[in-house]
Image (cartoon, grey):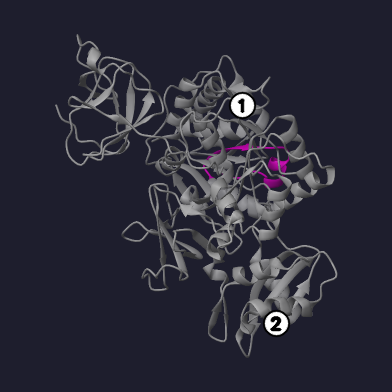
């Protein structure tokens, strides 16, 4: 299954609590998964009977960003969950935080 | 992304952290969110299409900012210091709206068609009502208007800058690490709620998980007291505030032991003031931020490391960076362009253009000012140095044209402020038959300085054409409450005095 991502679109995992928002879209359609299964758009029904794949269960922490260098995709986790984000079988890397000095 | 989501993330991830008020009795993020959802439900049910606020700082400010977002209605904080007729005119432009007001505002404004007033106490009661329904989710999408801010109107009719949810959240998620604040961090907010810094303070603190302690309105004694009593670690001030804070700290010698980060912006900071601040507050990291209402706050930052490097350096180019606003945010592009919009070489002055997701550049009823490639012309004059540091020289509209030569008031002001006897300085152009405009300065001094001293001081450092033709010695300069020099007022006064 492949998705055309757009900035601001929100997805949730089909098998755990994870929710993400697209910060930067991927260049083309991608097979975005969480917990080993394709994510679903917020507000749509997830297929039933799926379970978390242990190979994709390192977890997605709230507020962390995930990026894929090849496609340019960048996601922000808006609800933490037990599943790991991946494009196909390739787990998305958590982006290093480079906080700026606080100016507010 | 939507402001409602920022709050929801904070409430999910940091539910029990104190968000607002004293550590012992403040509201947690879960409580803040719950109250904002109740206020949001109540605001949604009211007929007003916008949610105004004319009040000092109080818990009603963050609650109304988030409550309006949850209700799906733009938040419009209005300057309570405006004269009654101007205030009434802006209120009328906000209709149809529900406006949350502090004491005395209803009496000042009088009835206005399409406006329903709600007192601060009534708004807080709606937010606290245990019977009140909490709105689930939030209204509208990320492309809708989150905040309307009337520009300070130092020139002409105030314009309402449009900030969409996407602009503000892009700024927050690209500059602030979610839950990145240590548990003990606390920020004092003393900038008024109708200033972009007041909005960004609420949003940044919420997303980073930093406790906020509010000061109703800036007062230097109260500010110093709260910083000490509440173990405040972070603060943002405008230049005029900093000088007054330092006077108190210097006089009582007690320092500000808890303070770690002091950010300043909103106008040019005189070098002597920042040098004095570094001397009096040796453990504080200083941050200079440059931004505009139309860019959702900060677009360039000079951080603590930059300050230290500049102070420690013998290289004049590095040392000069103390007068810069640092480097543009990595999520933005900055371009310096000439009068016809062509990019100028590094080191040359021109108009500062900026492009990025946080940049709105849009005014209500006037549309966008972005060009076809998405660049926003700031009307600020500036230059970039070899290493990418941005220097801001003031508003282009303030440039003095004397005998065909363009003079930047900021450059002359900076030189005047280097004189040890000068506390404040402002330079404007006034009409002159021979030159078109002539250069006039107004200064506040510590005494014992003559006009000739100052003219000689400028003449030896800049060209003679940049030396003020007249200098007026004053008790104070006209600033608005957010530290912005009222140049139009000053120009009128100086024109009358010297022509």
Asked if one can make out residue B22 in the rendered structure from this viewpoint, the answer is: yes
Residue marked by disc 2: B469
Residue B181: give x, y in percent of width and height.
Answer: 54, 30
Choose between B286 and B361: the one closer to the eye. B286
Q: Is residue B71 above or below residue B418?
A: above
Residue B386: give x, y in percent of width and height.
Answer: 44, 63
In screen coordinates, is B11 left or right of B221? left
Element marked by disc 1: loop
Q: Quadrant for the N terminus of chain A, please.
A: top left
Q: Are marks 1 and 2 on the same chain?
A: yes
Residue A74: give x, y in percent of width and height.
Answer: 30, 36
Residue sitting at x 58%, y 60%: B319
* Mark found first going from the N terminus, 1 or 2: 1
Choose between B185 and B192: the one closer to the eye. B185
Letter of the chain that mark 2 sits on in the rendering: B
Element marked by disc 2: loop
Letter of the chain that mark 1 sits on in the rendering: B
Q: Mark 1 or 2, which is nearer the eye?
A: 1
Residue sitting at x 26%, y 35%: A68
Choose between B1 and A36: the one closer to the eye. A36
Residue sitting at x 73%, y 68%: B419
Q: Quadrant for the C terminus of chain A, please.
A: top right
Residue marked by disc 1: B184
In the image, farthest residue toward the bottom? B434
In screen coordinates, is B387 left or right of B409? left
In the image, farthest residue toward the front? B314
Query: Is residue B98 found inside the magenta-colored segment of the image?
Result: yes
**Badge 1 density bin: few <14, some 14–19, many ≥20, Cα 10 Å:** few
Quarter of the image where one finds residue A55: top left
**Badge 2 density bin: few <14, some 14–19, many ≥20, Cα 10 Å:** some
**Magenta residues (range):** B95-113
């Amino acid at each position: 299954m492949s998705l055309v991502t757009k900035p601001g679109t929100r997805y949730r995992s089909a098998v755990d609590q994870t929710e993400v928002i697209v910060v930067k879209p991927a260049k083309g359609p991608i097979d975005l998964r969480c917990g080993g299964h394709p994510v679903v758009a917020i507000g749509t029904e997830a297929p039933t009977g799926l379970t978390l794949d242990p190979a994709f269960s390192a977890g997605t922490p709230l507020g962390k960003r995930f990026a894929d260098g090849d496609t340019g995709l960048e996601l922000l986790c808006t609800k933490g969950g037990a599943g790991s984000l991946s494009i196909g079988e390739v787990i998305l890397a958590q982006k290093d935080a480079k906080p700026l000095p606080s100016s507010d | 992304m939507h402001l409602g989501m920022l709050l929801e993330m904070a409430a999910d991830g940091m539910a029990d952290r104190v968000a607002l008020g004293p550590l012992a009795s403040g509201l947690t993020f879960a409580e803040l969110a719950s109250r904002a959802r109740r206020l949001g439900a109540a605001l949604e049910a009211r007929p007003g299409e916008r949610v105004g606020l004319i009040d000092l700082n109080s818990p009603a400010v963050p609650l109304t900012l988030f409550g309006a977002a949850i209700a799906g209605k733009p938040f419009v904080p209005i300057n309570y210091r405006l004269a009654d007729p101007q205030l009434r005119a802006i209120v009328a432009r906000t209709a149809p709206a529900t406006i949350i007001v502090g004491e005395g505002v209803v009496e000042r404004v009088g009835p206005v068609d399409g406006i329903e007033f709600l007192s601060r106490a009534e708004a807080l009661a709606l937010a606290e009502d245990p019977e009140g329904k909490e709105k689930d989710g939030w209204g509208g999408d990320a492309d809708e208007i989150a905040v309307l801010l009337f520009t300070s109107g130092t020139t002409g009719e105030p314009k309402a800058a449009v900030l969409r949810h996407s602009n503000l959240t892009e700024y927050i998620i690209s500059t602030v690490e979610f839950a990145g604040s240590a548990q003990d961090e606390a920020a004092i907010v003393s900038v008024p709620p109708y200033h972009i810094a007041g909005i960004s303070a609420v949003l940044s603190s919420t997303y980073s998980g930093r406790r906020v302690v509010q000061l109703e309105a800036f007062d230097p004694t109260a500010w110093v007291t709260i910083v000490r009593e509440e173990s405040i670690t972070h603060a943002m001030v405008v230049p005029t505030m900093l000088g007054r804070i330092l006077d108190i700290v210097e006089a009582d010698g007690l320092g500000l032991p808890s303070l770690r980060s002091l950010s300043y912006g909103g106008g040019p900071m005189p070098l002597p003031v920042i040098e004095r601040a570094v001397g009096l507050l040796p453990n504080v990291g200083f941050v200079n931020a440059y931004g505009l209402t139309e860019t959702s706050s900060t677009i360039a930052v000079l951080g603590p490391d930059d300050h230290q490097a500049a102070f420690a350096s013998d290289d004049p180019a590095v040392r000069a960076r103390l007068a810069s606003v640092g480097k543009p945010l990595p999520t933005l592009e900055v371009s310096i362009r000439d009068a016809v919009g062509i990019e100028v070489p590094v080191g040359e002055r021109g108009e500062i253009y900026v492009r990025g997701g946080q940049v709105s550049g849009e005014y209500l009823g006037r549309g966008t000012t972005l060009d076809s490639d998405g660049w926003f012309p700031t009307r600020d004059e500036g230059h970039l140095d070899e290493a990418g540091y941005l220097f801001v020289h003031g508003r282009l509209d303030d440039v003095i044209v004397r005998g065909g030569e363009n003079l930047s008031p900021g450059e002359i002001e900076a030189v005047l402020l280097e004189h040890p006897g000068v506390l404040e300085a402002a330079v404007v152009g006034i009409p002159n038959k021979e030159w078109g405009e002539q250069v006039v300065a107004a200064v506040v001094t510590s005494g014992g300085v003559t006009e000739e001293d100052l003219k000689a001081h400028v003449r030896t450092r800049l060209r003679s054409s940049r030396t003020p033709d007249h200098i007026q010695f004053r008790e104070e300069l006209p600033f608005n409450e957010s530290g912005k020099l009222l140049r139009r007022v000053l120009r009128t006064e100086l024109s009358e005095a010297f022509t």
